[in-house]
Amino acid sequence: MSVYDKIDFERYSRQIPMLRAMGQMKLAESTVAVVGLGGLGSLISYYLASAGVGRLILVDGERVELNNLNRQILYDSGDVGLPKAVLAAKRLKTLNPLVDVEYRDEMVSFDNVDDILGEADLIVDALDDWRARLILDRYSQLTKKPLVHGAIDGFFGQMTTIVPGRTTCLACIAPKQLGPRGCRAALGAAVGMVATLEALDAIKLLTGVGKTAENRLLIVDAFNSRIEEVELKPVECGTCWSRFEDQLLGED
Ligand SMILES: [Zn+2]
């Protein structure tokens, strides 16, 4: 399908006034990898597909569990036990047949990251695991591909957008000790606040419309209905990642 075939003016008529035809065209030409298809990835991939991103690469090796369904809106009760990546691809293809949707039913690792993300223009972190996030960050720094970051912890969340050369890297703001992976507490509507910020920044980066969260860490406080921000100074990266090498490579 050519880029022109991917632009349906009726389907996108409510957003073209904002993104312009040129922005819509840029979306149609873009390939975005959404890594993690849980609470964050469900919404992010849904919004990117509905907005008309030309090609999506969906990455997750997990199966749907019943306790996912309070927030992972791509899946239904009948999906428990089935692979998220397969289900998500099918759902999004139904939502918007103009989008090329590919999936990888596996978790990202140092071994497969280039194979999975090699054709992506933009990487979206929708993970619940700092070790895997740092693999994305490393890859983003090496390839200069932008990385939209988001994370959730109960009523709280954070997001920022990493653009190599323009911003700090993700390792610079990673916790000193990488905790266990997985989600302890999450409420769907609170997860959605972070997910929509991520989806918005992906669209803004691709279209050039609006202002992204580059060099700002947005702290989402869903308990008190507040979003605060911390300024991130672009630093000379180089040694920041090395403090995690033992924690990451030792376990690989
Ligand atoms: Zn850094």
Image (cartoon, helix red, strand yellow):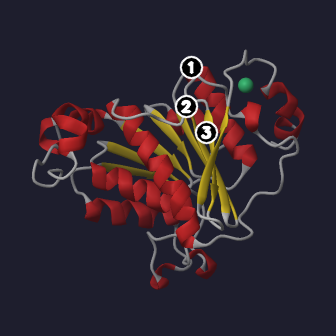
Quarter-of-image position of residue 11 = bottom left
Q: Residue at x 58, y 53 (%)?
A: 106
Q: Which residue corresponds to mark 2?
A: 214
Q: Type of residue at label 1?
A: Arg
Q: Is residue 46 above or below residue 70?
A: above
Label 2 environment density (alpha carbons within 10 Å; few <14, some 14–19, many ≥20): many
Number of numbered discs visible in the structure rendering: 3
Q: Earlier in the sequence, mark 1 or mark 3?
A: 3
Q: Disc 1 designates what residue? A: 166
Q: CA distance from mark 1 to mark 3?
A: 27 Å
* N-term-proximal mark, 2 vs 1: 1
Amino acid type assigned to the residue bearing label 2 in the image: Glu
**Residue located at (21% from left, 34% from top):** 25
On the picture, is 135 further left or further right than 245? left
Q: Amino acid at mark 3?
A: Asn
State left or right for residue 147 relative to residue 9: right
**Residue indicated by mark 3:** 112
Instruction: Confirm whether residue 111 shows in the render.
Output: no
